[in-house]
Image (spheres, rainbow, N blue to C red):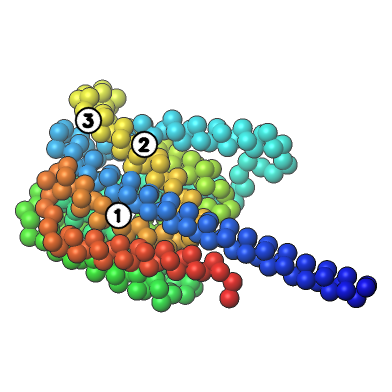
Amino acid sequence: MIQSFFIWQRCWLYIRSTLQAAHQQQQKDRVALYGVLMVLLSAVLFSGKAVLAKLVYRQSSMSVSELLVLRMLFSLPFYVAMLLLQWQQHKRNATHQSFMQQSHVLPTILLGLLGYYISSFFDFWGLKHISAGLERVILFSYPTMVVLFGAWFFKEKIQRHQVLALLLSYAGIGVAFAADFDQPQTGNVWIGAAFIVGCAITFSLYVLFSGKLVPQVGVSKFTAVAMLSATTAIFLHYFVMGGAVQQLLSFSPQVYGYMLLMAVFTTVVPSLLVSAGLKRVGSSNVAIISSVGPIVTIFQAWYFLGEPFGWQQAIGTVLVVAGVLWVSKKTTQQTKPA
């Protein structure tokens, strides 16, 4: 009878451990899936930034510095609120740890300057010269830069599925934008393209190093500190270069409406989503999944700006979506034990 009891006990322990493992696997799969969805949504929202910027440029004589100041001015209350909430939560927990480790403060500030100050200036300078569509195809060369920089700085192995996803996505982007080069452009295309290349390089470095730092700092805290540091730099830049408050108040209500949309839906919300996605799926996969952004911009630019949309853009959409679905599936599978 005792032997029978031990047999039943071992069976129960085996069943319980199996159920626990299955539950843990479901949790991991859910986390990976949520990460993919967050990155996808952030890419869709970020893609609207170029269209809104072109609308602002069309309806006003706003400079790049003025645009960035207004963008960050409308965003500032959200990031201050996020930081205050984090501080209150830290005080309630009454832990002996500091609010933010000293070793994390400077890297977070520097990444904020890199990703949302330097990179943003490059981006909006470039948009002065080229179309929203062309800006996206150049900017979204950054996923390959993230993968390559990851292999360079952190010795991350480039996975086969990442290569295939990149090939699919960039083949789609190339097809979709092939016709764009035949369209008349405003400004110096080469200068605009050079600025966007600079934006892609700086943003890829931001994505790469943020992926290492966000899990240690926390999504909300990292995002708030990084964006506040960028906001401070943008304000200083504007006033040091001779900008005036009166000039910021001289635009039409419609332009301010565009800036509010840009601040909330193409800055605050997607910056939180991409930080959360970085924590769940890693910087390389964030970069690849985000390649859906240019295709979304094609539709937005076609609808709002009258930029062309035809069979090439449709084929490109299919290829990019295929690449995104491929990397999404593989990202989920990577959470399963060998």
Q: CA distance from mark 1 to mark 3?
A: 24 Å
Residue 23: image location, x then y, percent? 63, 60
Q: Residue at x 15, y 63 (%)?
A: 312
Q: Say which amino acid is labelled 3.
A: Val
- Are the two marked residues, 2 and 1, in contact with CB atoms closer than 8 angstroms? no
Identify the mark nearer the N-term, 2 or 1: 2
Residue 167, by quadrant, is: bottom left
Total labels drawn: 3
The quarter of the image holding the N terminus is: bottom right
Secondary element type, mark 2:
helix
Identify the mark nearer the N-term, 1 or 3: 3
Q: Say which amino acid is labelled 1.
A: Gly
Q: Say which amino acid is labelled 2.
A: Val
Asked whether 273 or 311 is in front, the reply is: 311
Q: Does residue 233 appear in this view?
A: no
Residue 253, by quadrant, is: top left
Q: Residue at x 53, y 52 (%)?
A: 214
Residue 198 drawn above or below residue 11: above
Q: Residue at x 59, y 71 (%)?
A: 337
Q: Which residue is mark 1?
A: 293
Residue 270 drawn above or below residue 156: above
Q: Which residue is mark 3?
A: 255
Asked whether 22 or 104 is in front, the reply is: 22
The quarter of the image holding the C terminus is: bottom right
Q: Residue at x 37, y 53 (%)?
A: 40
Q: Which residue is mark 2?
A: 264
Q: Which mark is residue 314?
A: none
Residue 164 drawn above or below residue 46: below
Q: CA distance from mark 2 to mark 1?
A: 18 Å
Horizontal side of 305 relative to 72 (left or right) equals left
Secondary element type, mark 3:
helix
